[in-house]
Each structure stands twice: as C-alpha cells, then as structure tokens.
C-alpha cells in the first residue's frame, strides 16, 4: 500500500474498503436469514430468533400452561427469548468478527490519529 515515494496508494485502500463493506453486507444478509433457537424449562418453551435478533416464533408446551401460575410461564418465555438472543449474538460475533478484525490490520499508520491506522 505504500508507494515508492512514501505515499499511500489510496485507490488500493478504497478498493479494500469496498470489498470489506461488501463482505459485511453479505454477512448481515446471511444473519437476517438465519434462525437460532433458545430454550428454557428443559425444552418446555422454545424461542426462535433470526441472526439479527428478531423474534420469529415461540413454542410453549401445553403442560407448562397453568392459569394459576402465569408468572412461571412468563419467566420461562423470557428465559427462552434471552437464550435465543444470546445464541444470535454468538452467531453474529462468529460471522462479523473476522470482518471487524480485518478492518484495522491492513490500514496504514495515519500519523497517530486516534482510531485510524493499525
């Protein structure tokens, strides 16, 4: 990236940035189309969320439905959704982590400006 005269090849940097942006967009689309689940109560409640943490479905085993104990059911639903969201977060980190790591590694040192260069 450093040209013979000591300058930077801005077109190469821009090309790399565009490639990274395209990979990021593709990873985000893949995440939005991927579903993960979370459970609670030993599988009595199952929540399904997309990779971008949108709740898609909720399944409740009829045996856990007790009109006299709605609080337990509510707790199980919250726990299942949290579990699914945590699984979606892990998936996001797996998909986007390598892309985020690539943003700083190939950048030139831009004179010590905070957040720029690597």
Image (cartoon, rainbow, N blue to C red):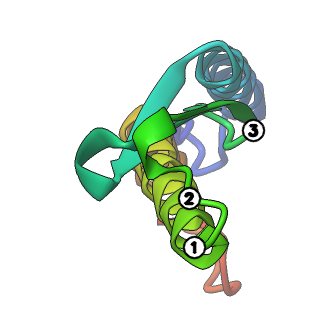
Q: Please report contact status of discs 2 and 1: CB closer than 8 Å, yes or no.
A: yes
Q: Left or right of 26: which side holds 73? A: left
**Which one is earlier in the sequence, the residue at label 1 or at label 3?**
3
Q: Which image quarter: residue 54?
A: top right
Residue 53, image x, y percentages? 67, 43
Gap between marks 3 and 2, in whole Å?
Answer: 27 Å
| Disc number for residue 54 | 3
Give me the residue at 70% from left, 22% from top.
32
Q: Which image quarter: residue 49?
A: top right
Q: Is residue 103 above or below residue 4?
A: below
Give me the residue at 61% from left, 86% from top.
112
* Residue 118 in sight here: yes
* Residue 107 in sight here: no
Residue under numbered circle 1: 69
Gap between marks 2 and 1, in whole Å?
Answer: 5 Å
- Check disc 1 and report its element: helix, strand or loop: loop
Q: Please report contact status of discs 3 and 2: CB closer than 8 Å, yes or no.
A: no
Residue under numbered circle 2: 66
Q: Is residue 13 above or below residue 100?
A: above
């Amino acid at each position: 990236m450093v040209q013979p005269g000591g300058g930077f090849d801005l077109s190469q940097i821009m090309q790399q940035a565009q490639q990274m942006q395209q990979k990021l967009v593709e990873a985000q689309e893949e995440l939005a189309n991927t579903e993960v689940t979370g459970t609670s109560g030993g599988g009595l409640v199952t929540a399904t969320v997309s990779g971008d943490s949108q709740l898609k479905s909720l399944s409740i085993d009829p045996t856990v439905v007790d009109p006299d104990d709605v609080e337990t059911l509510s707790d199980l639903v919250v726990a299942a959704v949290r579990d699914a969201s945590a699984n979606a977060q892990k998936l996001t980190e797996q998909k986007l982590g390598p892309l985020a790591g690539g943003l700083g590694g190939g950048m030139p040192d831009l004179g010590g400006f905070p957040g720029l260069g690597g």
